[in-house]
């Protein structure tokens, strides 16, 4: 019941707000403003996403705040890509194919633990807070520029849902490189004189 009221409240409060904000910032026609506010909104909405909090508690290898901020920054960046796609009329399939190529290339190098979490967390970034705000936000922005809502606005949630696949794998790759570097740095070094015998040692022999 609590989740039902939460979803209802989020929809009633966030959807009109998102549509209005999207329309207002797009009418300014200032690309830095559109991308800056889009990034900030994507970041803040993701930070407040309850599903992401649950995911962070499940991943013991990474501090909660590191994981949350990583995904939130990724959502902000991907929302910027979604806005650019809308403004420049870039086909959705082109961007999805390009980013999924990156996803599967990263999967070849990421530790298995991070890989499993990344592919299971596709729906985390597109939870009730994100979908009730970001989709109306994209629809309002699309209407303001006179675009086609069906082909331009829809697809923003698909972009956002792909965020953890890249950000969590990227985080796993960083952890792997740091662990490998730490192991190399902590290994004892053997110099060329390690087995050299001094004069006393020779006399003892």
Image (tube, rainbow, N blue to C red):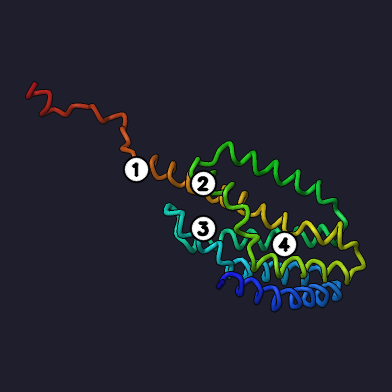
Relative horizontal placement of residue 124, taking residue 149 as reference (left or right): left
Q: Quadrant of residue 81?
A: bottom right
How many C-alpha atoms fall within 10 Å of the one at disc 4: few (<14), some, or many (≥20)? many
Q: In which quarter of the image is residue 62?
A: bottom left
Q: Where is residue 88 in the image (x, y as percent from the top left)?
A: 87, 58
How many C-alpha atoms fall within 10 Å of the one at disc 3: few (<14), some, or many (≥20)? some
Compute the Cα span from label 3 to label 1.
Answer: 32 Å
Q: Where is residue 4 in the image (x, y as percent from the top left)?
A: 61, 70
- Residue matched to label 2: 114
Element type where label 3 sits in the image? helix
Element type where label 1 sits in the image? helix
- Residue matched to label 3: 55
Compute the Cα span from label 4 to label 3.
Answer: 21 Å
- Residue matched to label 1: 186
* Residue visible at 78% across and 56% down in the picture: 155
Q: Nearer the viewer, mark 3 or mark 1?
A: 3
Element type where label 2 sits in the image? helix
* Residue visible at 75% across and 65% down in the picture: 135
């Amino acid at each position: 019941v609590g989740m039902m009221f939460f979803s209802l409240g989020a929809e009633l409060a966030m959807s009109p707000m998102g549509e209005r904000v999207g329309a207002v910032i797009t009418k300014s026609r200032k690309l830095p403003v559109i991308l800056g506010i889009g990034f900030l909104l994507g970041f803040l909405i993701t930070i407040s996403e309850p599903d992401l909090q649950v995911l962070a508690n499940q991943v013991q290898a990474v501090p909660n705040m590191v994981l949350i901020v990583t995904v939130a920054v990724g959502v902000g960046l991907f929302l910027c890509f979604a806005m650019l796609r809308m403004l420049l009329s870039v086909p959705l399939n082109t961007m999805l194919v390009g980013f999924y190529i990156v996803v599967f290339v990263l999967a070849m190098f990421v530790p298995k633990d991070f890989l499993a979490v990344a592919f299971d967390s596709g729906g985390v970034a597109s939870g009730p807070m994100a979908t009730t705000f970001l989709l109306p936000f994209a629809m309002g922005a699309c209407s303001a520029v006179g675009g086609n809502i069906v082909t331009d606005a829809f697809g923003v949630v698909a972009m956002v849902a792909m965020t953890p696949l890249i950000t969590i794998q990227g985080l796993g790759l960083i952890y792997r490189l740091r662990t490998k570097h730490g192991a190399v740095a902590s290994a004892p070094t053997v110099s060329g004189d390690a087995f050299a015998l001094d004069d006393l040692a020779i006399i003892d022999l």
